[in-house]
C-alpha cells in the first residue's frame, strides 16, 4: 500500500511548524540551528513530494541545492558561535544583540 | 622634387621635439642655432618645391601629397594631406623665409634670457603649425594649424608670465581667438552637411550643392574666424596687448605670419566667396573701416610697439579690402610685402628697445640716428616702404588694392586713400620721435637706469636680418609690377589658383597712372606733415586726444558690456546659486538620508528572535494574500 501525497505534505507542514516555533522560543543557539535545519528539511520534503506527484525531476534537483546552501550556512553560523564561545562561557542568541548597529 | 613637401612642416616639428627633450641641456645659444637651422632647412625645402612647381606647365601646378588618413569615419575620410599649389607655396616661402631671419635675430635678442631654449621651442612649434595651416588640403587639417598657431601665440605673448600684464595679455589673445574660432567650426559643419566633404578640391567641385544663403553664411562664419585671427573690427584689441610678448614674437607672429592667416583663409576659399556678393561687401567694408580706424589710433600711441601693432591691424584691413573686392592676388602681394617691411620695422624697433635697455616709450627716445646708424637706415627703408613711397614695395602693393577698390566700391576707395595718408603720417611720426629731435632717453626712464648708458648698436645676428629685410622691402615691389609683364611677374602665377574668382577691373592705363600718382602724392603729404610736426617737438597733446590713445575706448566698452555683467553674474552664481541651490540640494539630501536612517535604526534591536518573528509574520501575511487571491 502506498500513502497519498497529502500525508507527506502534512508531515512536512508539521515539521516546519515545529521548526518555526522552536526558532522563536528557544534561546540556545545550537537548538535554533537544529530548528532551522528542521524547517529546511520540511521544505525539502515538500519538494520531493511534489516532484513525485507531478512527475517532475526539477523538485528533486532543487533539494540538492538546498542541502548545499544549508551546509554552507551552518558552517558560517557555527563559526560565529565558536567565536562567541571563545569570549564568554555560554552563549544564547540574545547575547548577540551587542552586534546591533 | 615636389615630394619633399612633407619636410616643410616636419623639420620645425622635429626641431620642436628635440628642443623639448634636450633644449635645457643645449642652452644658450645652441638651442637657438638648432631652432634657426631647422627653419632655414624648411626654407630651403620650400625653395626646392617652389622650383619644382615652376618647372611644371601652368594647369598642372597643383599637387596633393597625402600623408595619412587622419579620421576615417564611414563616408568621411579626413586625410592629413598637403596641398601644394602656387598660393600655398607663396605662403610657405615667405613664412619660412621671414621665420628664419627672425629666428636668427632672436638668438641675439633673447640672449641671457632664463628660458632661452623654451623660446625657440615655442617658435619652432609655431612655424610648424603655420606651415600646416597654409599647406593643409582640407578645412579640418587647416584648423589644426589654425589652433596650433593660436596656442603658440598664447604661450609666446605670455612668455614673460611673471609680469601680470603679459599673463593677462596672453589670456586676452587666446579668448578673442577662441571666440572667433567658433565661427570656423560652425562653417566646417555647414560645409560638411552640404557637400559631404571637407577638402578644398571637393568643396569647390560641389559648389552647386551649396545654396546662396548657406554660401553667404559659410563665408561670413569663416570671416568671423578670420576677424579674430587677423585682428579686425571689432575683435582687434588683443593685438595691441599682444605686444607684451618679446619683440621677435611681435614681428613674426603678430605682424608677418599668424595674423595674416585670416587673409589666407579667405583667399583659399575664394571660389566660395565669389558666389556671394553680400559676403564680399561685408569683408571689404570691415577691412576698409578697420584699416582707417586702426590708422587713426596708430597716430596717437606712445609705445613704439603699439604704433606698429595698430599699423598691422590697419594693413590687415587693407588686405581684407582687397579680398572683398576680389583682388586676391593683390591681397597676397600686400601680405608678402607687409611681412617684409613690418617684420623689418618690428625688428628695428626691437633693436631700438634693446639698445635703450628695454625702453619702449617714444617720448623717451629721440636723436637715435646718431647712435644707431644701421638701425636708422634700415628702419627708414621700412618706413618709406609702408608709407607707400614709390618705388618701394608698399607703393605697388597698396596701389593694386586701391585700384581694385576704385573700380568696385568707390566709397571704400576714399577710405583706403585716407588710410594711406594716415599710414604715412603715423610711421613718419614714429621715425621722427625715435630717430630725430633731442636726446630724451637720459631724462631718467621708468626702469630707472636711464642716463648713464649710451644707446648701442645691436650685434650682427640682429643686424643681418635687418639688412636682408630692408633689401626685400626695397625690391619687393618688383614681384608684381603693374601691367603684368608676361616674362616677369612672379606673383602673376597666383592667378590660376583663383581663376574666375578674381575680379577683373578693366581700367585704362591713364586711370592707373592717375591713381598711382594720387597714391604717391597722398603718401608724400602724410609723410611731410608728420615730419614737420614731430621732428622737433615731442609733445603735441592736441594731436593725441585720449579717445585715440585709448583706442576709441573699445576695451572700456567691452569691459562695461561683457566684463562687468559677466563678473556680476559670476558673483551671483558664487554667492546665491552655489550656496543656496547647489549646496542646499546636496546638504538637504544628506539631511533627509540621516533623518531616515536615524529613525530606521531603532528597528534593528540585535535580538535574533525578533527578526525571525518578523520573517514569520511577513511569511504569514504573504501567504494570506496569496490565499485570498486564490479564493477570489
Image (cartoon, helix red, strand yellow):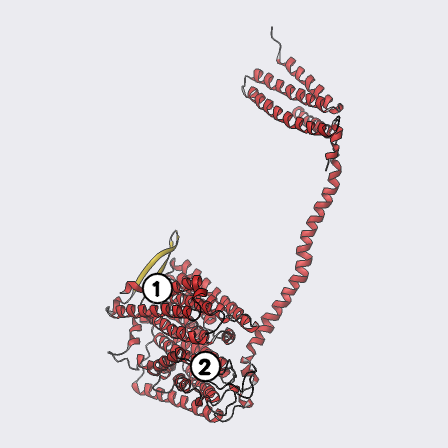
Q: Quadrant of residue B627?
A: top right
Identified at 31% across, 88% down, the residue is B510
Residue carrying label 1: B204
Q: Quadrant of residue B407?
A: bottom left
Q: Quadrant where the N terminus of chain B lies?
A: bottom left
Identified at 61% across, 24% down, the residue is A71
Q: Nearer the viewer, mark 1 or mark 2?
A: 2
Q: Position of residue B391 (x, y in %)?
A: 34, 86
To which chain does the residue with label 1 belong? B
Q: CA distance from mark 1 to mark 2?
A: 43 Å
Q: Count residues near mark 2 (Cα–Cα under 10 Å), then give few for <14, some for 14-19, many for 20+.
A: many
Residue B349, which numbered label?
2
To which chain does the residue with label 2 belong? B
Q: Position of residue B605 (x, y in %)?
A: 75, 34
Residue B62, which numbered label?
none
Which is more toward the observer, B4 or A7?
B4
Looking at the image, residue A2 lies above or below residue A85: above
Identified at 62% across, 24% down, the residue is A70
> In the drawing, does residue B518 fall left or right of residue B355?
left
| Helix, strand or loop under label 2 | helix
Amino acid at each position: 500500500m502506498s500513502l497519498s501525497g497529502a500525508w507527506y505534505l502534512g508531515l512536512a507542514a508539521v515539521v516546519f511548524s515545529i521548526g518555526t516555533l522552536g526558532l522563536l522560543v528557544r534561546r540556545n543557539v545550537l537548538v535554533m540551528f537544529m530548528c532551522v535545519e528542521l524547517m529546511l528539511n520540511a521544505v525539502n520534503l515538500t519538494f520531493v513530494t511534489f516532484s513525485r506527484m507531478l512527475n517532475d525531476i526539477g523538485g528533486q534537483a532543487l533539494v540538492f541545492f538546498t542541502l548545499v546552501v544549508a551546509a554552507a550556512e551552518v558552517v558560517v553560523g557555527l563559526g560565529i558561535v565558536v567565536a562567541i564561545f571563545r569570549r564568554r562561557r555560554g552563549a544564547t542568541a540574545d547575547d548577540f544583540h551587542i552586534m546591533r548597529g | 622634387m615636389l615630394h619633399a613637401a612633407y619636410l616643410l612642416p616636419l623639420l620645425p616639428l622635429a626641431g620642436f621635439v628635440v628642443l623639448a627633450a634636450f633644449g635645457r641641456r643645449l642652452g644658450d645659444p645652441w638651442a637657438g642655432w638648432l631652432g634657426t637651422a631647422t627653419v632655414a632647412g624648411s626654407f630651403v625645402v620650400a625653395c626646392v618645391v617652389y622650383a619644382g612647381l615652376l618647372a611644371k606647365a601652368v594647369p598642372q601646378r597643383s599637387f596633393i601629397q597625402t600623408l595619412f588618413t587622419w579620421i576615417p569615419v564611414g563616408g568621411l575620410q579626413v586625410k592629413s594631406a598637403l596641398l601644394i599649389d602656387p598660393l600655398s607655396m607663396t605662403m610657405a616661402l615667405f613664412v619660412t623665409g621671414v621665420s628664419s631671419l627672425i629666428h636668427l635675430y632672436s638668438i641675439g635678442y633673447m640672449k641671457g634670457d632664463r628660458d632661452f631654449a623654451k623660446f625657440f621651442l615655442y617658435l619652432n612649434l609655431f612655424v610648424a603649425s603655420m606651415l600646416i595651416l597654409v599647406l593643409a588640403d582640407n578645412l579640418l587639417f587647416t584648423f589644426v594649424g589654425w589652433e596650433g598657431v593660436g596656442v603658440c601665440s598664447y604661450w609666446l605673448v605670455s612668455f614673460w608670465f611673471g609680469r601680470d600684464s603679459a599673463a593677462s595679455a596672453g589670456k586676452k589673445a587666446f579668448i578673442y581667438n577662441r571666440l572667433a574660432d567658433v565661427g570656423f567650426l560652425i562653417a566646417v559643419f555647414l560645409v560638411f552637411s552640404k557637400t559631404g566633404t571637407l577638402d578644398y578640391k571637393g568643396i569647390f567641385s560641389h559648389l552647386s550643392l551649396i545654396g546662396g544663403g548657406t554660401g553667404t553664411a559659410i563665408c561670413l562664419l569663416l570671416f568671423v574666424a578670420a576677424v579674430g585671427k587677423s585682428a579686425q573690427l571689432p575683435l582687434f584689441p588683443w593685438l595691441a596687448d599682444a605686444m607684451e610678448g618679446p619683440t621677435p614674437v611681435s614681428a613674426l607672429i603678430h605682424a608677418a605670419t599668424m595674423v595674416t592667416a585670416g587673409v589666407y583663409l579667405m583667399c583659399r576659399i575664394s571660389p566660395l566667396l565669389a558666389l556671394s556678393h553680400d559676403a564680399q561687401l561685408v569683408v571689404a567694408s570691415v577691412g576698409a573701416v578697420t584699416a582707417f580706424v586702426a590708422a587713426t589710433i596708430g597716430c596717437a600711441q606712445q609705445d613704439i610697439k603699439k604704433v606698429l601693432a595698430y599699423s598691422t591691424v590697419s594693413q590687415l584691413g587693407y588686405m581684407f579690402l582687397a579680398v572683398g573686392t576680389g583682388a586676391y592676388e593683390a591681397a597676397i602681394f600686400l601680405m608678402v610685402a607687409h611681412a617684409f617691411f613690418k617684420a623689418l620695422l618690428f625688428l628695428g624697433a626691437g633693436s631700438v628697445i634693446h639698445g635703450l635697455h628695454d625702453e619702449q616709450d617714444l617720448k623717451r627716445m629721440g636723436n637715435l640716428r646718431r647712435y644707431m646708424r644701421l638701425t636708422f637706415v634700415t628702419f627708414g627703408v621700412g618706413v618709406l616702404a609702408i608709407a607707400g613711397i614709390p618705388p618701394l614695395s608698399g607703393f605697388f602693393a597698396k596701389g593694386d588694392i586701391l585700384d581694385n577698390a576704385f573700380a568696385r566700391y568707390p566709397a571704400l576707395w576714399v577710405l583706403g586713400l585716407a588710410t594711406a595718408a594716415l599710414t604715412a603720417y603715423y610711421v613718419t611720426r614714429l621715425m621722427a620721435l625715435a630717430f630725430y629731435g633731442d636726446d630724451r632717453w637720459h631724462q631718467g626712464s621708468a626702469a630707472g637706469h636711464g642716463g648713464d648708458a649710451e644707446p648701442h648698436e645691436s650685434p650682427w645676428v640682429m643686424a643681418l636680418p635687418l639688412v636682408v629685410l630692408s633689401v626685400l622691402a626695397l625690391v619687393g615691389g618688383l614681384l608684381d609690377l603693374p601691367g603684368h609683364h608676361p616674362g616677369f611677374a612672379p606673383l602673376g602665377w597666383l592667378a590660376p589658383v583663383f581663376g574666375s574668382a578674381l575680379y577683373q577691373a578693366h581700367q585704362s592705363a591713364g586711370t592707373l597712372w592717375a591713381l598711382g600718382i594720387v597714391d604717391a602724392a597722398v603718401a608724400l603729404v602724410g609723410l611731410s606733415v608728420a615730419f614737420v610736426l614731430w621732428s622737433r617737438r615731442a609733445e603735441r597733446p592736441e594731436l593725441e586726444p585720449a579717445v585715440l590713445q585709448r583706442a576709441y575706448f573699445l576695451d572700456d566698452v567691452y569691459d562695461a558690456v561683457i566684463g562687468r555683467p559677466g563678473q556680476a553674474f559670476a558673483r551671483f552664481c558664487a554667492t546665491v546659486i552655489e550656496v543656496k541651490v547647489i549646496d542646499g540640494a546636496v546638504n538637504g539630501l544628506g539631511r533627509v538620508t540621516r533623518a531616515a536612517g536615524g529613525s530606521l535604526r531603532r528597528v534593528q534591536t540585535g535580538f535574533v528572535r525578533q527578526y525571525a518573528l518578523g520573517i514569520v509574520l511577513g511569511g504569514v501575511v504573504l501567504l494570506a494574500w496569496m490565499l485570498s487571491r486564490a479564493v477570489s
